Amino acid sequence: MRTFYDKIIKRAADFLLALAALVVLAIPLGLVALLVKTKLGSPVIFKQERPGRNGEIFTLYKFRTMTDERDANGELMPDEVRLTKFGKLMRSLSLDELPELYNILKGDMSFVGPRPLLVKYLPLYNARQSMRHNVRPGLTGLAQVNGRNLITWEEKFEWDVKYVETLSPWLDIKILFRTVLNVLKREGISSETSATMEAFTGTKQEAAK
């Protein structure tokens, strides 16, 4: 039953909702794109390869929130330097995530699921953490409504795996509802020590489950 819901019902709902959202939000998306172009310049869309279901790589689309400011050696400056006030506002309202509706329409992602992280993290996951790739990644998920960037990577992955193990339509509805509340409250956008989130460097063996 869980597989039928994930592969058939959930996928159909994702497609229809993403299509409707893209139509309804066409003008707001255009306005946000114009603001990004004005405030941060080109490119307006940030593209990056991310692992999806079963670890298959796809191209993620987001609105750009950072500048391309570099140091004297030509290296990109830290996130806290490149993330402008406008970018922080975009992230706090989750407006930067709107282009991912296209990823959902294509089938790369779902509205609900573990967030797609960096490709370089793939070899760092332990066996349990890798279970997060058993479903499509999501625009939001259990980790996002239970602390987002304020919790540790290990805590995030546990929430991700819990989602995989307890996947159901009721859980998805609950997560979507809590996501709306969190966006309104602007909670968990940044970690306590970083403008975004510290890089994942792997889980110590004794902490692995």
Image: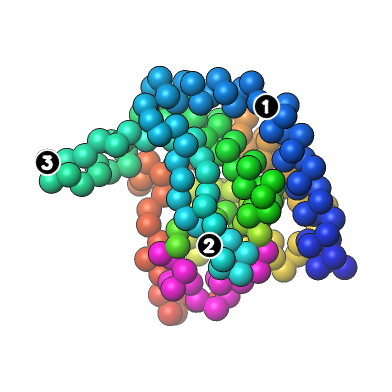
Q: Amino acid at mark 2?
A: Ile
Q: Quadrant of the N terminus?
A: bottom right
Q: Mark 1 = which residue?
A: 25
Instruction: Name the N-terminal-most of marks 3 and 1.
Output: 1
Residue 12 image offset from top left, x and y in percent:
81, 51
Above or below — where is 196 with respect to 167? above
Q: CA distance from mark 3 to mark 1?
A: 41 Å
Q: Amino acid at mark 1?
A: Leu
Residue 44 image offset from top left, x and y in percent:
44, 32
* Left or right, 164 with reference to 173: left
Q: Which residues are magenta?
A: 120-135
**Mark 2, secondary structure of its residue:** strand
Above or below — where is 156 with respect to 208? above
Q: What residue is rendered at 72% in x and 33% in y?
A: 21
Q: Is residue 158 visible?
A: no
Instruction: Name the N-terminal-most of marks 1 and 2.
Output: 1
Q: Amino acid at mark 3?
A: Ala
Magenta segment's dominant SS is: helix
Q: Nearer the viewer, residue 52 or 23?
A: 23
Q: Mark 3 = which residue?
A: 72
